[in-house]
Image: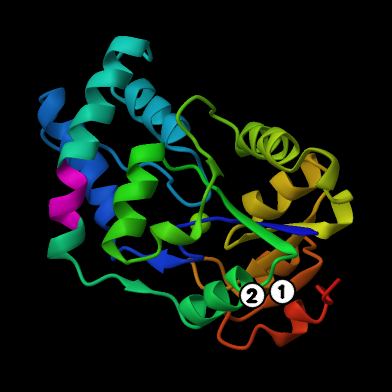
Amino acid sequence: MYVVLFDIDGTLISTGGAGGAALMGAFRDTFSIGDPRPVKFSGRTDRAISGDLFQLHGLANNEENWGRLRDGYLERLPGELARRSGKVLPGIESLLDTLTSRSDVSMGLLTGNLPDGARIKLEHYGLFHFFPFGAFGEQHEKRDDVARDALQLVQRRLADRTPQRDRIWVIGDTPFDVQCARAIGCRALAVATGIHERDELALSEPDLLLEDLGAPDPWLQQLPSQ
Ligand SMILES: [Mg+2]
């Protein structure tokens, strides 16, 4: 058995900035802040990004503010996705079909998105049905903690069929994805389909680095059928 844990943004899809626009729009309107200061999004959890926004603008980083921002974000997200020209990234549909057809591969999500945010994005692009489980960024500021959740989920779902860690792969487009794979002792495939250049990703020392998943054979060769 193998387990493959996919990041969403910059790995499976590009939303054309819909996620960021929905969050910043919700922040602006909910807290009446005309021109919010920018924060870093890439590879981070929605909880961490929101915490930065609160801190930068002198707002309490508490459950009440977080709940208001989260609700506003989820309300805006479908409209932003419809308005922007995002896309499924190269080779993804074919790769997901290939992996789904294998009885020795279990696929899930490992993402900084909220559960509902992940569902809304992936339903928009017709990919949600590929992922029966996932670990999300609702509670955690650190992606490594999301990875720990993902591993626990895998162990609960697969029980004694849980593979060794070197057969569990995390696929993502940022150094944080590689780092969180290491946090749980698993392997990392980095793809240069997000904002990070190949050279930059190489510094995080993934097990494998690909330009995109349009030609995934170098990786699939590492998952021989069992
Ligand atoms: Mg990403």
147 or 60: which is nearer to us?
147
Instruction: State yes or no: residue 68 in magenta.
Output: no
Q: Quadrant of residue 128?
A: bottom left
When the figure is inspected, residue 57 is found, relative to residue 168, above or below; the finding is above
Q: Quadrant of the N terminus?
A: bottom right
When the figure is inspected, residue 82 is found, relative to residue 91, above or below; the finding is above
- Amino acid type of the residue that numbered disc 1 sits on in the rendered structure: Leu
Residue range (magenta): 76-80
Mark closer to the observer (1, 2): 1
Which residue is at a point 21% across and 32% down the rendered structure image? 27
Residue 139 is at least partly visible in this image? yes
Q: Are marks 1 and 2 in contact (CB under 8 Å)?
A: yes
Which residue is at a point 75% across and 63% down the rendered structure image? 203
| Left or right position of 193 against 83 | right
Q: What residue did someone put label 2 on?
A: 198
Mark closer to the chain start, 1 or 2: 2
Q: What residue did someone put label 1 on?
A: 209
